[in-house]
Image (tube, helix red, strand yellow):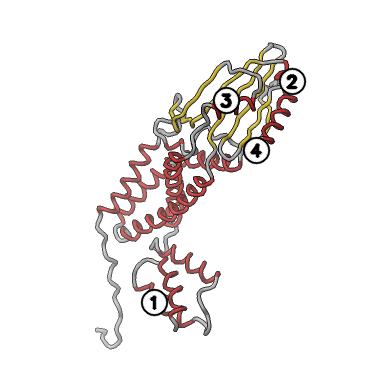
Amino acid sequence: MSRRLATPYRLLLRVYPKGSRRGELADTLLMAAEAGHVGPGPIETLNLLRHGMRARLGRPLNRGVVVLAIFASIISGFLSASLANRIGWEAAPALPSGAARTQLAQMLTPGLSAQSYGRSDALFRNNGGETDAASVSYSTDRTPATEDVDAYLAGLQQRLEAAGWRVTDTYSTSPTDIETGARQNNSQALIARNDALVLSFEDYFDAASAEGGLRVSIYRAEPRWLTGSTLAVGLLGMLAGWLLAGWASRRLEHRPLAAFLAATTAIGGLVLLIPAWLLGSLQYLGILSGTALPDSPFWHGLVPTDDFGGMAYPAGAAITAAIAVAVLCPSRPAPARTRHRPGLSQ
């Protein structure tokens, strides 16, 4: 069989754990390959990948180890993506300042001066138990022009589109009557973004109480390179989680007490991270689609000082303990198989 045919098969079979099984499969597949065949086809490739990843887990009759490996893979991908995203933000562009900030404010609220102003240049900060992203915000008093909410937002949208922004969402912020559902005033908001920034703009006006004004908040948009690297590292993390689960499973396969202790501890730690994973996944999907504000990172549930991050410490301790059990417990060889040899019966 030609080397051209053998190489792709042998590379593909690296998905199987080390051992004689790799060589046996390679010999079988190469002998069965048709003449002129240059490599495994799509269906054959997927089949080998599926069975190879399953073989990594050992315990061929145990379905529970598959569930645990899937669970570990998902959480590992989330943790890896979160770490990559946090590190990547260090290299992201800063918020506009100086002349650039002034020019942006003149485009958003022409002729109006800020009555209150806030700025946070720290990448992320704890704000009363919530992890906030860097932002610039200010508010203005109402004017006859801002009191016509529909017209003012229509003009703003035109200015934004002319400046290269795109409006991703508009919605009402007016409180509603509990019984009738009727809006109590005509307050509205929009979200817009360009390649570098995300804008949250609210025009609120209550004629009954003669209150109103504009609220403006500007956040950094996630750069495309950061989104791509976050997703790529997340996928690699999922693979690493599966391989780690497989390594621990095979190492402790013949040590039932240690395997039970490691699996129980790992499951406990992974379960504690489910809320952070669910919240983070939903938030990140909203950020990617442009329907959610990047006012906090999707991984804020992993920050111990965050309201939702209180379970990060015990989860980390449990997962570390499970890995330690697998590392410190020496593997036990599989029981030898007795073979019946004809002519030697007693």
Whether residue 168 appears in this view of the structure is no
Q: Which residue is more in the foreground, 237 or 199?
A: 199
In front: label 2 or label 4: 4
Residues at marks 2 and 3, CA–CA distance in whole angstroms:
25 Å
Which amino acid type is shown beneath numbered disc 3? Thr
Say which residue label 1 marks: 24
Disc 3 residue crowd, few under 14, some 14–19, many 20+, Cα 10 Å: few
User: Circles 2 and 1: CB distance less than 8 Å?
Assistant: no
Mark 2 sits on what residue? 148
Q: Secondary structure at mark 4?
A: loop
User: 26 above or below 310?
Assistant: below
Front tag of 2 and 1: 2
Q: Amino acid at mark 2?
A: Asp
Mark 1 or 3 closer to N-term?
1
The foreground one among 309 and 164 is 164
List the residue tagged with mark 4.
Answer: 164
Q: Which residue is mark 3?
A: 102
Direction from residue 323 to residue 128 in the image, left or right: right
Between marks 1 and 3 in the image, the one whose residue lies nearer the viewer: 3
The CA span between labels 2 and 1 is 77 Å
